[in-house]
Image (tube, rainbow, N blue to C red):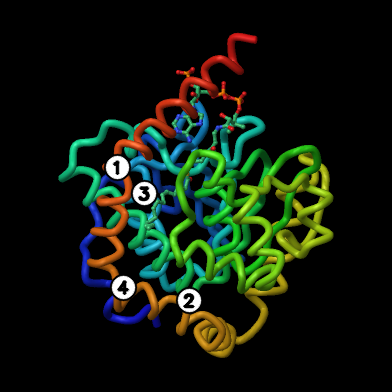
Amino acid sequence: MASSILRRFIPRKTTWMYGQRMMSSTIDVSVDEQTGIALMKMKRKPVNSLNLEFLQDIRNTIVTLEQNKKCKGLILTSDVPKIFSAGIDILEMYQPNEERLHNFWRALQDMWLQLYMTPLATIAAINGHSPAGGCLISISCDYRIMAPNYTIGLNETLLGIVAPFWFKDAMCNTVGYRETEIALALGKLYSTDEALQKGLVDEVVTSEQIMEAAQRKMLEYVKIPNMARAMSKQLMRQETADKLCSTQDSDVQNFVNFCLQDKVQQSLGFYLEQLKKRKSK
Ligand SMILES: CC/C=C\C/C=C\C/C=C\C=C\CC(=O)SCCNC(=O)CCNC(=O)[C@H](O)C(C)(C)COP(=O)(O)OP(=O)(O)OC[C@H]1O[C@@H](n2cnc3c(N)ncnc32)[C@H](O)[C@@H]1OP(=O)(O)O
């Protein structure tokens, strides 16, 4: 069902399939053919930050799962303790090679379109911090379950950058316009409890219970007749996806121009320094 626009780009083939298991250096996937549920664990150490190759791997995995007739649902989680995903790999944006920067943003767009519009039912089992791009992955799933004592949100302004319009749209579709307006301006990182209260996540359970809770909820999703469920998702999301599909090239160019500004580079350099300092404290 993902529109043909979404299939224009053939993903890199770096994911290997062994029976019901798929592996790459950054992702571990298993498919339970009895239930039709796939489990994707992100494992790009140290913080599952999203670089070009990791984004291509995530998209490639979703495409492969969509082609598996037995697979109906996908649970996304992290294999890295306490971190779901630290969002975009800031090193892709800081002092970048311009050609790679183009390819990187395109890969982020393509991954997002694939995940947001996949006919598979998707659940994010958010078992760690989930800032910025990590939050985007979470809100692109159909349902979110989060473990306590972590943070989630679109904190781009804290880095001196701006959330792209499609991050904003996905957030608005989840928590509404006014909450998004406040969240984006302040670069707000919500605690798990706040996220539940604002509807940014749907359920909170302990880290120990999160996989069981995700499986339980997924069984509800995959019980629904597949086509009807997938079409209702398309009904809700196509307009948002089309907005990016029709402006992908200009969005890449805007991002590259924005990133290459001296002021933006300074902000990113400063933010990276702060991250390192925080660590040494
Ligand atoms: C006109 C407009 C047009 C277009 C739009 C323009 C621009 C939009 C552009 C971009 C949108 C970006 C979205 C993003 O995703 S930006 C990334 C935001 N992410 C963060 O702010 C997270 C930062 N990280 C943390 O807060 C923490 O690391 C943590 C909570 C995730 C984990 O904390 P820990 O204490 O467990 O681990 P650390 O010691 O902090 O980190 C370990 C190691 O990893 C490095 N690192 C952390 N996060 C990142 C990252 N996102 N990218 C790259 N590297 C990261 C950290 O520096 C440490 O490195 P060293 O071991 O010290 O080398």
Residue at mark 3: C-beta within 8 A of ligand 1: no
Instruction: Mark 3 and mark 1 in contact? Answer it, CB < 8 Å.
Output: no
- Which label's residue is closer to the chain start, 3 or 1? 3
SS at circle 3: helix
- Disc 2 or disc 4, which is closer to the eye? 4
Residue 58 position, x and y percent, is: 40, 52
Residue at mark 2: C-beta within 8 A of ligand 1: no
Which residue occupies 65% across, 72% down?
177
Give the camera-side residue of 75 and 53.
53
Alpha carbon separation for disc pair 3 and 4: 15 Å
Structural crowding at the residue carrying mark 1, measured as other residues with C-alpha within 10 Å and reported as few (<14), some (14–19) or many (≥20): few
The amino acid type of the residue labelled 1 equals Gln
- Which label's residue is closer to the chain start, 2 or 4? 4
Instruction: In the displayed orientation, state which residue is furthest to the top.
Output: 280
Relative vertical location of residue 114 with respect to residue 95 in this rendering, above or below: below
- Which label's residue is closer to the chain start, 3 or 4? 4
Structural crowding at the residue carrying mark 2, measured as other residues with C-alpha within 10 Å and reported as few (<14), some (14–19) or many (≥20): many
Is residue 178 shown left or right of residue 258? Answer: right
Q: Which mark is residue 6?
A: 4
Q: Can you identify the residue that label 1 sits on?
A: 261
Alpha carbon separation for disc pair 2 and 1: 38 Å
- Which label's residue is closer to the chain start, 2 or 1? 2
Alpha carbon separation for disc pair 2 and 3: 19 Å
Give the camera-side residue of 223 and 153.
153
Q: Can you identify the residue that label 2 sits on?
A: 119
SS at circle 2: loop
